[in-house]
Image: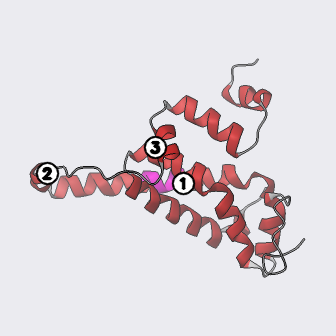
Amino acid sequence: MKTLEQGECLESSDADYVASSRNGHPEDFRVLVQRYQRPLFAYLTGQVKDPLEAEEAAQESFVRAFTSLEKLRKPESFFAWLMGIAGRVLKEHYRARERRQKQEPLAEELLVESPVPPSDYPLEEALAGLPESYRQVILLRYYEGQSCQQIKLKSGRVK
């Protein structure tokens, strides 16, 4: 497999890039980030409803994935593993938010909402506005490349 320095090979699988990153080519992890930053951001925006917080959570998720790459048992399932990491990051985010709200309840009430600037991520915001089940289907189909049959099996609709 080629590294990014030798020329990017987009046809390579996630498992190829994970293996390359583990074998002394950490720059190949960038390809995984490029593949999955948009769907991960869309998922996180849908959860936290704030693009800045979602971006922060996405960055944290990628950092944790990179530093824990050796723990990944099924490199071909990188995206699913990344989503699991993002779920844990979100739980920590919610716990921290609850702690802040308990410590400073009056500060929350005094905040005046500022106008929302135009978004740099209209597609991600549109996905974020969908119900969770629809968002999951879109992420699985168009970003993870799963077939409709695989998605149906995962959702438990086909018995």
Q: How many marks?
A: 3
- What's the distance in space between the residues labelled 1 and 3, CA to CA? 18 Å
> Which residues make up the magenta segment?
87-91
Mark 1 or mark 3: whose residue is earlier in sequence: 1
Three-letter amino acid code at disc 2? Answer: Val
User: How far is the residue under mark 1 from the one under mark 2?
Assistant: 30 Å
- Looking at the picture, which amino acid does disc 3 mark? Glu
Foreground residue among 50 and 65? 50
Drawn side of residue 69 relative to residue 37, left or right:
right
For label 1, the residue is 86
Position of residue 32 in the picture relative to residue 74 (left or right): left
Image location (x, y in percent) of residue 111: 14, 53
Image coords of residue 115 (percent x, y): 23, 50
Q: Is residue 90 magenta?
A: yes
Residue 4 is situated, as x and y percent measured from the top left of the image, at: 78, 75
What is the spatial separation of the Cα atoms under label 2 and label 3, in whole angstroms?
A: 23 Å
Does dot 2 land on a helix, a strand or a loop? loop
Q: Residues within 10 Å of mark 2 (few under 14, many from 20)?
A: few
Q: Nearer the viewer, mark 1 or mark 2?
A: 2
Could you say where residue 158 lies in the image, as x and y percent from the top left? 75, 19
| In-front residue for pair 147/118 | 118
Looking at the rendered image, the quarter that the C terminus falls into is: top right
Q: Which mark is residue 52?
A: none
User: What residue is rendered at 35% in x and 53% in y?
Assistant: 95
| Residue hosting label 2 | 112
Q: Main secondary structure of the magenta part?
A: helix
User: Which of the two residues, 136 or 126, is positioned nearer the viewer here?
Assistant: 126
Q: Amino acid at mark 1?
A: Ala
Pointer 3 residue:
125
77, above or below 34, in the image = above
Residue at 64% x, 63% y is: 33
Q: Quadrant of the N terminus?
A: bottom right
